[in-house]
Image (cartoon, rainbow, N blue to C red):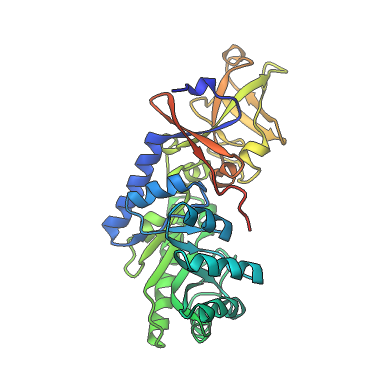
Amino acid sequence: MTSPADLDTPALVLDLDVIERNIAEMAQVARAAGVRLRPHTKTHKSPLLAAMQVDAGAQGITVAKLGEAEVMVDAGLDDVLVAYPLVGERKLLRLRALLERASISVSLDAVEVAEGIGAVGTDLGRPVPVLVEVDTGHHRMGLPPGEPSVALAMAIARVPGIEVIGLLTHAGHAYQAADPAELHRITEREALDLIRTAERCREEGLELREVSIGSTPTARVGAQADGVTEIRPGTYIFNDVQQMRLGVAPESACGARILATVVARPTAERFLIDAGSKAFSSDGGDGPPFPGRGVIAGRPDLVIDFTTEEHGVGHLTGDAASLSIGDRLEVIPLHVCSAVNLFDIAYGVRDGLVERTIPIAARGRSQ
């Protein structure tokens, strides 16, 4: 086996022991709460890691794009939620091909989108399962909870070739929570708004079997809400600085690191590494209690101040002699999902050795 010290940099390194613990912990959260776990694979874009999640108890997976779904179905994963509205003839043709090979459901928030998908279901002779997205505070997709979403769900249910099986939401605004108490309030609001909207749909005669909430920060608390049937966390498999800031995960639970090499020491305080925005992405804001463009594992004396495309530029707060050109650093990304998408392969490490390479097979599949 190869040592990580022998890898060329920048490299995406995955701690297999940490990842396996993270997978098992979230699976146990779902089991204990009596809800289904449908992890979002846009975090890792790897059929191998998705299969590990399913083997540990996940009852299907979530993807963001059809390209990701095609990669996962090609690898044998056969229960997939495409959590994205599908618009346009090309995408509908691809959806039809997937529906002939696997169990596929789709989320949406408009009758016009439902009509295109319904035409596929009509052509196949069986309705396409869909979940109606509800805006519980993120203000990205969906109508507000309550009557607006109830009316929308009822209208979509009347579209031929469609079966409305549930409601879905993503509390992306949870990432802006100032403290654990605010995060808890956002989570409770997310679940309650979705549950009450589902109850109103049932009162109107629309039977729903899924009430699905997303996001790693809200999954553990939201799973406990009476009426939630499914959780769709993604980042939990790796965790990142965002989860650390929210108090959701400690550094020891961050299983994905960007291995980088110190390539310059222009001053006693400044250092450069060979990983910039094309390794970390520019996604995710910095701030207390973890300043900088990522956390350098085990080196609180080092801060990455900014990145350009190929450079990470930081400063040293301690002894200048403690960092030299050629030293290797492990950087926990601010937002791991967008960072992983920048690599073709990851290196799975256990006990200080590279145990396997893991293709990021769905990277770049944004169509």
Relative vertical location of residue 320 with respect to residue 42 in this rendering, above or below: above
Q: From the viewer's perspective, tell me whether residue 71 is left or right of residue 1.
A: right
Q: Nearer the viewer, residue 179 or 359?
A: 359
Q: In which quadrant is the N terminus drawn?
A: top left
For residue 158, say whether it is visible: yes
> Residue 231 lies in what quarter of the image?
bottom left
Q: In the image, what residue occupies the spot 50% across and 41% down? A: 240
- Give the position of the C terminus as an image quadrant: bottom right
- Quick one: 106 or 258, which is closer to the camera? 106
Identify the residue at horizontal 61%, vertical 53% (top origin): 365
Q: Is residue 183 above or below residue 122?
A: above
Q: Which residue is located at x 50 percent, y 77 percent?
A: 124
Q: How many marks?
A: 0
Residue 142: percent from the left, percent from the top? 56, 71
- The image position of residue 310, as x and y in percent, is 70, 32
Where residue 331 sits in the image (x, y, percent)? 55, 32
Is residue 247 among the parts visible in the rendering? no
Q: Who is closer to the viewer here, 208 or 149? A: 208
- On screen, 226 above or below 155? above
Q: Residue 122, how many percent across, how many down? A: 52, 82
